[in-house]
């Protein structure tokens, strides 16, 4: 995934104009997000780690009305993670599969010609699919709509290509599985 992202950035950079300026209008991007999974099941014995981080894929697009205000929508596939355990001598397993959609207003503030900071605020639709087997049979996930918020920075490589880094909050997550925050890195292309 990192090789593909690097090749995309290098290709777009080579084909783009060398002038660096803020671009108003439509943009699209791809990224990776690191999120935390946690399975807090009481009174269990397990060889699996009950928590950990996982890389996720993200696509997003938006429109900037001017150098300050815009809108953005995106999809993040957090993937799946499983946790196996034994409770009272009975085996159990929980599997989580999560993804989110969001739409948000975006406010940016240029720091200099290449760097800007931004914040996003909107709504996310989070699907946290959970399934259980053994002693965990009956565990279910759900879909929730929640507050989406993000703060980050953007570095313009040229007029058309920028790199982004941000901390995102996708609203309340399920009790088991993916947690609600993620650290995301991406590349975007301005049309």
Image: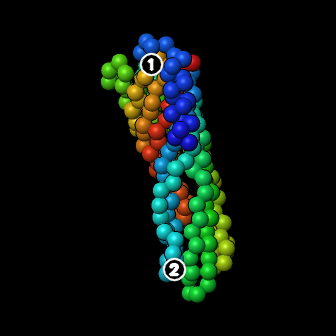
Q: Residues within 10 Å of mark 2 (few under 14, many from 20)?
A: some
- Residue located at (32% from left, 20% from top): 112
Horizontal and vertical percent for residue 169? 47, 46
Image: 73 above or below 77 = above
Q: Nearer the viewer, mark 2 or mark 1?
A: 1
- Give the alpha-carbon distance from disc 2 to disc 1, as whole Å: 53 Å
The image shows a total of numbered marks equal to 2
Colour convention of the picture: rainbow
At 54% across and 31% down in the image, what residue appears? Answer: 7
Q: Residue at x 57, y 69 (%)?
A: 83
Q: Position of residue 32 (x, y in %)?
A: 52, 42
Q: Position of residue 116 (x, y in %)?
A: 37, 26
In this view, the residue farthest toward the bottom is 89
Near-viewer residue (143 or 160): 160
**Label 2 secondary element:** loop
Q: Farthest residue toward the left?
A: 111
Where 47 sits versus 145, above or below? Answer: below
Q: Which residue is mark 1?
A: 158
Residue 65: percent from left, percent from top: 51, 19
N-terminal of the pair, mark 2 or mark 1, is 2
Quadrant holding the N terminus: top right
Q: Is residue 114 visible?
A: yes
Quarter residue 135 falls in: bottom right
Q: Residues within 10 Å of mark 1 (few under 14, many from 20)?
A: many
Task: Identify the residue position indicated by label 2 in the image.
Answer: 44
Q: Residue at x 47, y 42 (%)?
A: 184
Q: Is residue 96 left or right of residue 170?
A: right
- Label disc, if present, on residue 139 of the rendered structure: none
Q: Dividing the picture into quarters, in which one does residue 101 lie?
A: top right
Question: On the rendered structure, is 155 left or right of 12?
Answer: left
Residue 126, visible in the rendered structure: no
Q: Tell me the element at label 1.
A: loop
């Amino acid at each position: 995934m990192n090789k593909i992202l690097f090749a995309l950035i290098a290709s777009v950079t080579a084909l783009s104009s060398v002038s660096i300026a803020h671009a108003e209008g439509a943009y699209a991007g791809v990224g990776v997000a690191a999120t935390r999974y946690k399975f807090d099941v009481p009174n269990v014995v397990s060889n699996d780690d009950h928590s950990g981080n996982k890389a996720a894929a993200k696509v997003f697009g938006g429109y900037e009305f001017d150098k300050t205000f815009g809108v953005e929508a995106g999809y993040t596939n957090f993937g799946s993670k499983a946790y196996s355990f034994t409770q009272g001598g009975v085996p159990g397993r929980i599997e989580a599969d999560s993804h989110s959609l969001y739409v948000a207003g975006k406010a940016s503030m240029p720091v200099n010609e290449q760097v800007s900071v931004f914040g996003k605020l909107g709504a996310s639709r989070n699907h946290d699919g959970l399934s259980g087997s053994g002693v965990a049979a009956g565990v279910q996930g759900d879909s929730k709509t929640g507050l989406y918020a993000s703060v980050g920075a953007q570095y313009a490589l040229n007029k058309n290509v920028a790199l982004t880094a941000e901390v995102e909050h996708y609203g309340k997550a399920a009790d088991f599985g993916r947690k609600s925050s993620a650290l995301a890195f991406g590349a975007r292309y301005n049309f």
